[in-house]
Amino acid sequence: MKGIGDLANHLGLTVGTVSRALNDRPEVSLKTRKRVQAAAAELGYVPNQSGRALRKGATNTVGFMLESGTAFAVGGDNFFHGVIAGLQQTLEPRRLDLILLPCAATEDPHEFLRRMVSRRIVDGLVISATQRQDPRIALLVQSRIPFVALGRSGDVPEHAWIDLDFAGVAKDAVSRLVGKGHRRIAAAVPASEINLRYVFTEGYRAALARNAIDFDPNLVLPVELSEAGGAALADRLLALPSRPSAVLLVNELLAIGLYHRLAQLGIQPGRDIAVIGFRENPQARFLSPHLGSYRLSLADLGIALGQTLLSRIDAAREARRPEPVGRLWPMDYAPGESEG
Amino acid sequence: MKGIGDLANHLGLTVGTVSRALNDRPEVSLKTRKRVQAAAAELGYVPNQSGRALRKGATNTVGFMLESGTAFAVGGDNFFHGVIAGLQQTLEPRRLDLILLPCAATEDPHEFLRRMVSRRIVDGLVISATQRQDPRIALLVQSRIPFVALGRSGDVPEHAWIDLDFAGVAKDAVSRLVGKGHRRIAAAVPASEINLRYVFTEGYRAALARNAIDFDPNLVLPVELSEAGGAALADRLLALPSRPSAVLLVNELLAIGLYHRLAQLGIQPGRDIAVIGFRENPQARFLSPHLGSYRLSLADLGIALGQTLLSRIDAAREARRPEPVGRLWPMDYAPGESEG
């Protein structure tokens, strides 16, 4: 039997159009509806079959837990839009709807997730903003709900995760800066206990060691991941006893406030201090001088999360033990004028 | 009987802490748990009562439909974070969870909503990005599901809505600019059929008329609501046969690209062209020269949406006909250096 994706490919139509045609929706012309339905019969596609199979005791819904306090800030706002679009693209052929589960800043994330799991409103889950110690992972493993984590944690239970390569970015940024003659390089890291703080700092430290530069803990600056945090960072950099000649940023929102505050003080990125940002995003693209940062396809990341989750949903249905999956997501340097 | 909000007020604790204490969660100290539980007994608070009542045939969940194609762009990204936090604050004492329903850009919003309604996964809905003609409103009225629209539409059925005062902002911005001697004032509006396009343009037009300035359709520039749209806007403004001396923006993302492109061309906002932005947001706050724009409390807007929705959920439970509510949300001018 063919899936709806195969059917769409065969016909040169989008999955959405094929789905609407199979449901006899009036938005699709009668001619196209007939054509799709004929091809479905010819190719042995049975409408709704996979949906129906899943629906046995299932919700046909996948949840993405978002934490307003941390996750939203990890990659800036647009980050999640891109990932969500990729996820939806992967889920649509399986007739799975994505719902977002925002955990309020005032609520305990573990307690929130426990409630969502006990309500059984989703067949699978994506969690993000993984903390160094994250009790949500043990909860999900125990409850046997298929899930994938966007981000690692320091916790033991085997599970599926995909994480941006924070250590790789830190190493690459330090090497670039050392290559330009910098030896006193600061790093702005999250002030929270989010796991990426430790991964990023370790990568930074390892790259310094490789270049025979002593690690100075005063140059690791925990900041709030926001525009205001970037402005505060500028003042802290300048207040250091021996001013660093370069700084790397763990988050893209920081660059906006950093640039603004430096400009007020007459200090220009790229000329007076080297700056390397984290993720290239639309706001950073409009900074002057252009910010050097790292590029990734958010849609591809969303697709990978979706595929990993689907394979785990399938394994659960077939009572198979899924393979544990751990995957680092690479990011490519997009040069700017800010790295000096 | 007291609600959990009253109990929290009485004890000087947050609703979250009281909730956790009533559920005997270990994050709350034993002493506080005992204190909360004693006060609950004393004041006649029955844990879960309102939840239980609602749960009769209910989901205890409220949905917020988000459209990646339009809604996300209406107010920029942070817009929804603030509104969601306010909504959650209002729903929490009623033990209602908020879930977000993101409609993929590839899917028809009406069809998406129809599916969500037929699944009965929520007790009430917030919709946004209302179009000039929006079939979702008739669908929700017919299905008798309680809802509130963030944004008006040109459609007939009576329903509850709260809308930012787009016309008021356009009128105020034009008056300010005329007061500074400007007569040739352009307006950047959305390129889509979203209803606010028409409301904003009408306000702009009315304010011109009040100041005896002829309306010139060439000065109304439909743009994509993004940073890139703002950059394109700069080129279009400069390409006009008789260059406008001022421009007002319907969206905050536009300012970022507009500033950047103008800077490349050696044109400075406030000195060479007056600019008034729409919503004051963190990114705009870090633009130089400081952008004049309009301020609102996103949390208060979320609270108002939540209260309106709750009153409609209550009316539905009691088989009452709810009052139609239409409410314009005012915004206050926060002066900048960009208005000349």
Image (cartoon, coloured by chain):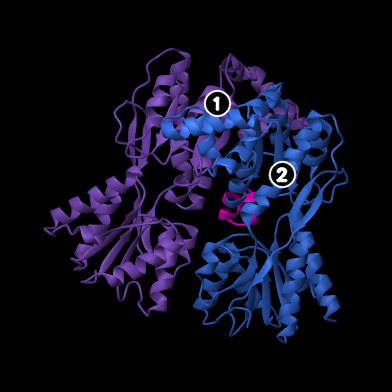
Chain colours: A purple, B blue
Task: Return the residue at label 2.
Answer: B307
Pointer 1 local density, CA inside 10 Å: few below 14, some 14–19, many at least 20: many
Vertical position of residue B60 compared to residue A72: above or below: above
Q: Residue at x 53, y 68 (%)?
A: B285
User: In this picture, is A37 found above or below B199?
Assistant: above
Name the mark nearer the viewer: 2 or 1: 2
Figure quadrant of residue A53: top right
Q: What's under tag 2, amino acid-wise? A: Gln
Q: Is residue A228 above or below residue A239?
A: above
Q: Magenta stretch: give its range.
A: B68-81
In which quadrant is the C terminus of chain B drawn?
bottom right
The location of residue B117, given as percent across then percent down, is: 72, 30
- Label 1 marks a residue whose chain is A
Q: Marks 1 and 2: in contact by CB < 8 Å?
A: no
Q: Which residue is mark 1?
A: A122
Secondary structure, mark 2, is: helix
Q: Nearer the viewer, residue B110 or B312?
A: B312
Left or right: B59, with B136 as reference point: left
The spot of residue A68 in percent (x, y) is: 50, 46
User: Which subunit holds the residue at mark 2?
Assistant: B
Residue found at x 71% / y 70%:
B187
Name the outermost residue toward the front.
B42
What residue type is disc 1 on? Val
Decide: few, some or many residues near mark 2? Use Cα within 10 Å; few <14, some 14-19, many ≥20: some
Q: Are marks 2 and 1 on the same chain?
A: no
- Left or right: where B208 falls relative to B340: right
Find residue A299 and report its horizontal and vertical position in percent: 48, 43
